[in-house]
Image (cartoon, helix red, strand yellow):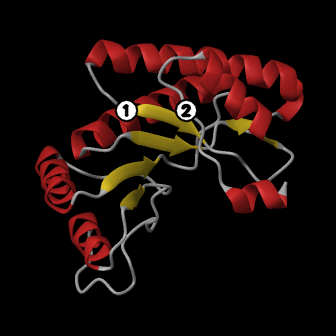
């Protein structure tokens, strides 16, 4: 079991993920989540520096994909969400992360059963693309806190059991809220 911050610790002397990783290590933490909830802007050189910092410190990295994903939305929304999640996972892999955490979407008018099936189909496609690209990054659907959001404990466990390359992310505060 590892503990670490989501994003740069407030006590970091300098901004940026690389410095945040080094500060988390100084604090004796074992992991670090790159907080990409509001989007990602990063080039290959920055990804390489982040990967080096993680290797140097031994911290395990994950990334949180942008919040604006909805794998169960209308066709164009779901397609754009798949691309965002795939892009986030590929970049996370270049940074040395082992997983990318995300909120899968909303039930909307589909209801839980149909939305869950659509999300599972999207996760299969994305996981296959990651394998095709040689990216060793797990997709980690997060247990969500709202009844309108896909991502109950049962759903994320089922997706993880059914789809290679998918593993659950249990957020205990979200579980409590739900």
**First reached walking from the N terminus: tag 2 or tag 1:** 1
Residue 105 picture location, percent across and down: 69, 37
Q: Quadrant of residue 151?
A: top right
Q: Nearer the viewer, residue 167 or 148?
A: 167
Q: Left or right: 155 with respect to 55? A: right
Is residue 100 depicted above or below 83 in this figure? below
Mark 2 neighbour class, 10 Å CA radius: few under 14, some 14 to 19, many 20 or more = many
Residue 163 picture location, percent across and down: 57, 17
Counting labels gives: 2
Label drawn at residue 167: 2
Q: Quadrant of residue 23?
A: bottom left
Q: Left or right: 155 with respect to 35? A: right
Q: Is residue 40 visible?
A: no
Residue at x 57%, y 50% (from the top left corner): 67
Q: Nearer the viewer, residue 157 or 8?
A: 157
Residue 75 picture location, percent across and down: 65, 20
- The residue beneath circle 1 is 137
């Amino acid at each position: 079991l590892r503990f670490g911050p989501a994003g740069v610790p407030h006590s970091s002397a300098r901004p940026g993920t690389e410095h945040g990783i080094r500060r988390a290590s100084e604090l004796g933490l074992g992991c670090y989540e790159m907080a990409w909830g509001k989007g990602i802007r990063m080039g290959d050189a920055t990804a390489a520096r982040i990967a080096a910092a993680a290797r140097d410190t031994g911290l395990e990295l994950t990334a949180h994909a942008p919040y604006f994903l909805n794998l169960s939305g209308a066709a164009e929304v779901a397609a754009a969400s798949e691309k965002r999640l795939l892009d986030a996972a590929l970049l996370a892999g270049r940074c040395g992360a082992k997983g990318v955490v995300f909120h899968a979407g909303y039930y909307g008018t589909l209801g839980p059963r149909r939305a869950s099936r659509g999300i599972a189909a999207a996760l299969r496609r994305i996981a296959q693309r990651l394998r095709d690209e040689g990216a060793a990054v797990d997709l980690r659907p997060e247990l969500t806190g709202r009844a309108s959001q896909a991502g109950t404990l049962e759903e994320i466990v089922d997706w993880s059991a059914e789809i290679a390359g998918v593993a659950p992310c249990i957020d205990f505060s979200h579980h409590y809220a739900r």
